[in-house]
């Protein structure tokens, strides 16, 4: 069924859109990532202009994150306090990021910077996660039993002032590290135009020592707010949110998120981490290939404003 | 007598003679407006017409017809990937200003026979002469724009696609793509002899979003903030709804 989208100004297949929403929602519910990294290129592939894809994608992420959070909430796997601390940091970080983005854009070197930092970050994060989760799985195999589960891992985050209890995560740590991580991820998402769940999830697991299961719900919880903010910003500044497109993506997305959350609970934490690591590395590899391989077409056309 | 010729004679008979010497165009469109609704997926427009003349048909030099359909102009950015330090990055870019979102040219004979280059340049009939830049650095970008838009069907040159019977009746079908930009589409019909334009006629096709498309487009532009919140509301309700339904299912 072909449907003409009023803002994207293109006629696309409605079932394809529901399908895309479903896949992205599934990953979102499973890993606690927003999925902007996937939805933008997929929409672009079926002919939606990039600006509309980015803005509308963020609206879809709001819906699938809400669906995912509610699924996690029933298992008490959302740390609201941690979510709010990360969010506060995120707001500061993204304000700085938006300012730097405008500066770099004026210099005309933003594309190179964005793509390089994307590959660099995803590559590093993916490799660290892969190494850690592989080691955890091997350790479990060798001893033949699950390792002794400590209440939490002690990290450098425990020696700082302004301590706060995060009961759901089972942590008693300073608010400075989560704040800083929130700010850093907010900064990155403003510059790279992606939600930042990819960086946020590993940072919560490895830097803050939060349990993997709580991380997914908490990450989704804070993604709701950041993507809701981006959606409204895009709607106001560039009028590039297509509600009809969003509706179809959301339809698939909210259902996919429920399935993702369901699969997530049944999966062991190490396997969940290793799958996320592989996904991160795949995305990184794709972007890297684009940079290295000689393109078939050197030129590209995008709608633009008058100089 | 052949049927097209008969129709031609009938049409000619009906028309009241105004100009005695010249050949002029009489034309019509199968539809002068296109409504973009939710199920719009491209459309075809039939452009037809006849040549009105007083004198007997002059066989030599032959008469030709050229039809152009031009969409609204919008600014674009053309980027080129370049290799820097071993990686391919969008480096150079050109902002040529507003360029047509759609441009189709149909002719009744090969273009080189139907139109002299100087006439083309003077009246801006085909796109390539308009896409000439005195700046040699800019030219590859404009060539790429023409090439890419031609590949995706937004720019087209269909030589010999106009049916022209008895030097009098002509018709052609112009296909408008599914990704259509709203605006006024300018239709120009040229009558040429030996590459010289002897008559020109203009028409307009109004392309407008209607119904739901119109409503959403207006809402997004006029009530941007409200529209943004409406988008969030939909997302919130859908997220909550899915969760509630799946909880009921107890699976």
Image (cartoon, rainbow, N blue to C red):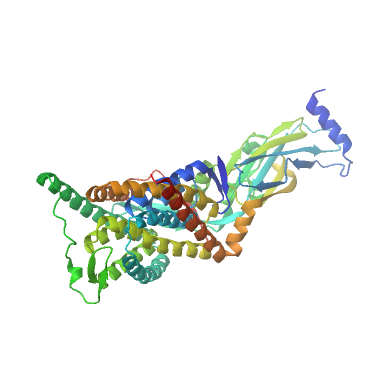
Whether residue A307 is visible, yes or no, is no
Q: Residue at x 55, y 59 (%)?
A: B97
Looking at the image, residue B179 lies above or below residue B85: above
Query: As rendered, which of B201 and B118 lies closer to the eye?
Result: B201
Furthest residue toward bottom: A161
Looking at the image, residue A82 lies above or below residue B195: below
Relative horizontal placement of residue A203, taking residue A27 as reference (left or right): left
Q: Quadrant of residue A243?
A: bottom right
Looking at the image, residue A5 lies above or below residue B54: below
Query: As rendered, which of A217 and B244 lies closer to the eye?
Result: B244
Question: Residue B205: x percent and y percent?
Answer: 70, 48
Question: Residue B48: x percent and y percent?
Answer: 74, 38
How many numbered marks are there? 0
Q: Residue at x 49, y 64 (%)?
A: A232
Question: Residue A17: x percent and y percent?
Answer: 48, 45
Q: Quadrant of the C terminus of chain B?
A: top left
Query: As rendered, which of B200 and A83 lies closer to the eye?
Result: A83
Q: Quadrant of the N terminus of chain B?
A: top right
Query: As rendered, which of B173 and B248 lies closer to the eye?
Result: B248
Question: Residue B140: x percent and y percent?
Answer: 47, 50
Whether residue B53 is visible, yes or no, is yes
Q: Residue at x 37, y 63 (%)?
A: A222
Q: Quadrant of residue B165?
A: top right
Furthest residue toward top: B1
């Amino acid at each position: 069924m072909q449907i003409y989208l009023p803002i994207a100004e293109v006629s696309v297949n409605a079932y394809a859109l529901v399908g895309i929403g479903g896949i992205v929602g599934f990953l979102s519910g499973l890993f606690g990532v927003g999925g902007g990294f996937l939805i933008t290129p997929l929409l672009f592939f079926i002919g939606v202009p990039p600006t509309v894809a980015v803005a509308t994608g963020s609206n879809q992420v709001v819906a699938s994150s809400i669906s995912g959070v509610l699924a996690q909430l029933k298992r008490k796997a959302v740390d609201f306090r941690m979510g709010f601390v990360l969010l506060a940091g995120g707001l500061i970080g993204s304000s700085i990021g938006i300012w730097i983005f405008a500066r770099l854009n004026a210099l005309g070197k933003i594309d190179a910077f964005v793509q390089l930092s994307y590959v660099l970050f995803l590559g590093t994060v993916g490799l660290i996660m892969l190494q850690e989760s592989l080691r955890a799985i091997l350790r479990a195999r060798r001893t033949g039993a699950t390792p002794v589960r400590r209440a939490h891992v002690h990290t450098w985050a425990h020696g700082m002032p302004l301590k706060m209890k995060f009961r759901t995560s089972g942590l008693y740590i300073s608010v400075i590290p989560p704040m800083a991580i929130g700010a850093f991820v907010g900064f990155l998402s403003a510059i790279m135009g992606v939600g930042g769940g990819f960086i946020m999830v590993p940072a919560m697991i490895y830097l803050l020592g939060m349990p993997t299961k709580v991380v997914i719900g908490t990450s989704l919880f804070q993604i709701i707010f950041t993507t809701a903010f981006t959606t409204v910003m895009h709607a106001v500044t560039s009028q590039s949110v297509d509600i009809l497109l969003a509706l179809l993506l959301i339809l698939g997305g909210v259902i996919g998120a429920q399935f993702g959350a369901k699969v997530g609970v049944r999966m062991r934490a190490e396997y969940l981490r290793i799958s996320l690591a592989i996904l991160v590395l795949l995305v990184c590899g794709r972007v890297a290939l684009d940079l290295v391989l000689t393109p078939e077409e050197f030129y590209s056309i995008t709608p633009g404003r008058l100089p | 007598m052949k049927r097209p010729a008969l129709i031609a004679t009938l049409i000619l008979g009906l028309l009241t003679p105004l100009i005695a010497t010249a050949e002029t165009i009489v034309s019509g469109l199968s539809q002068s407006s296109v409504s973009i609704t939710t199920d719009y997926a491209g459309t075809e427009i039939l452009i037809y017409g006849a040549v009105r003349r007083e004198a007997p048909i002059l066989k030599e030099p032959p008469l030709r017809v050229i039809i152009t359909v031009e969409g609204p102009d919008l600014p674009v950015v053309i980027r080129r990937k370049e290799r820097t330090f071993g990686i391919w990055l969008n480096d150079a870019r050109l902002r040529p200003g507003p360029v047509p979102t759609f441009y189709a040219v149909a002719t009744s004979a090969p273009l080189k026979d139907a139109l002299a280059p100087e006439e083309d340049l003077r009246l801006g009939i085909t796109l390539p002469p308009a896409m000439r830049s005195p700046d040699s650095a800019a030219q590859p970008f404009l060539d790429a724009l023409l090439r890419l838009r031609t590949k995706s069907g937004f720019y087209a040159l269909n030589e010999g696609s106009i049916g022209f019977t008895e030097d009098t009746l002509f018709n052609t079908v112009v296909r408008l793509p599914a990704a259509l930009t709203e605006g006024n589409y300018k239709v120009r019909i040229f009558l040429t002899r030996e590459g010289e334009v002897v008559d020109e006629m203009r028409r307009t096709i109004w392309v407008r979003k209607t119904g739901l498309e119109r409503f959403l487009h207006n809402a997004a532009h006029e009530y941007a903030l409200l529209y943004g919140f409406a988008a969030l509301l939909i997302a919130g309700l859908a997220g909550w709804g899915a969760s509630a339904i799946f909880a009921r299912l107890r699976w």
